[in-house]
Image (cartoon, rainbow, N blue to C red):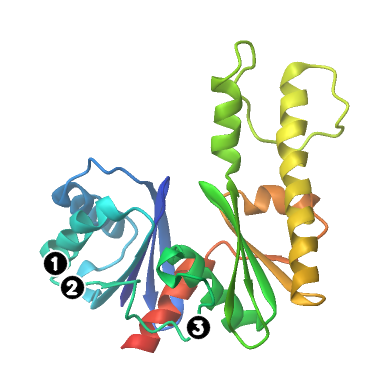
Amino acid sequence: MLLVIDVGNTNIVLGVFREKKLLDHWRVSTNRLRTTDEYGVLIRNLFYLNGVNSEEIDAIIISSVVPPIMPTLERMCQRYFGLIPLVIGPGVKTGMDIKYDNPREVGADRIVNAVAAYGKYGGPVIIIDFGTATTFCAVDKKGNYLGGSICPGIGISTEALVQRTAKLPRIELRRTKHVICRNTVESMQAGVYYGFVGQVDGLVARMRKELGGMAKVVATGGLAVVISPATKSIDVVEPMLTLEGLRIIYERNC
């Protein structure tokens, strides 16, 4: 079985594949202070509680946008699974030509998502990842990764609004019935929710124009299912897109 690990700034998402089938997946907080042993025990306990046999893991692949945590995770893989993980980075075969000015600058998660989306839907395709940052990536019909846009994520934008104002409270992200609201909480909810909906539709329209017409729009990330119903541009939500991309890249390298 293959263990795939996607390390984000806020969460680490793990999944276990048997061949092409995703058997189970988990989401834990990204904590740079956790030790090798703490991560090892955490993951082994998740396996045990969900009926996954740790001894059947025979390969591991990791993508990460948090470099300081990687030595800890690599030691964990060796100590608790006896395996050296394949880490997404220079030299790893993705099957995708990256047209960025400096390909090393592209976040591993963006490439992994692009590989999965193009593999499933072809191109041109636009991938939106609602993570700590909201990223928009474009792949052309030939499978070239062209680049994209990066915006502050919904969570950190909302938190900044609360921290930098004296009277505005923390809110739950939810879709309101109106945008002309009569209380502070709903006013904030409407502004945040429909503000990001407008951002999605606006950026997608510009990206489609630059791509020369229509493009499939695939959304992923924790808040994709919350935001997508109000947009005009998102065609499909793929919550496990990154994990699928990791599986595909592993198969291309082994």
Label 3 – label 1 distance at C-alpha: 29 Å
- Select label 3 or label 1 by which is in front: 3
Q: Which residue is mark 2?
A: 84
In the image, residue 108 sits, relative to residue 21, either above or below, namely above
Check disc 2 and report its element: helix, strand or loop: loop
Picture quarter containing residue 178? top right
Picture quarter containing residue 184? top right
In the image, residue 56 sits, relative to residue 78, either above or below, namely below
For marks 1 and 2, the one nearer the N-term is 1
**Most foreground residue, 162 or 25:** 162
Three-letter amino acid code at the position of disc 3:
Met
Q: Looking at the figure, which quarter contains the N terminus?
A: bottom left
- Select label 2 or label 3 by which is in front: 3
Badge 1 crowding class, 10 Å Cα cut-off, few under 14, some 14 to 19, many 20 or more, is some
Label 1 – label 2 distance at C-alpha: 6 Å
Check disc 1 and report its element: helix, strand or loop: helix
Checking the image for residue 78, the label placed there is 1
Three-letter amino acid code at the position of disc 1:
Gln
For marks 3 and 1, the one nearer the N-term is 1
Does 147 sit left or right of 106 as displayed? right
Label 2 – label 3 distance at C-alpha: 24 Å
Q: Residue at x 77, y 40 (%)?
A: 194
Badge 3 crowding class, 10 Å Cα cut-off, few under 14, some 14 to 19, many 20 or more, is some
Q: Position of residue 224 (x, y in %)?
A: 64, 53
Q: Which residue is mark 3?
A: 96
Three-letter amino acid code at the position of disc 2:
Ile
Check disc 3 and report its element: helix, strand or loop: loop
Q: Position of residue 10 (x, y in %)?
A: 42, 45
Q: Residue at x 36, y 81 (%)?
A: 250
Callout 2 touching callout 3 (CB < 8 Å)? no
Q: Position of residue 87 (x, y in %)?
A: 30, 70
Q: Position of residue 242 (x, y in %)?
A: 49, 67
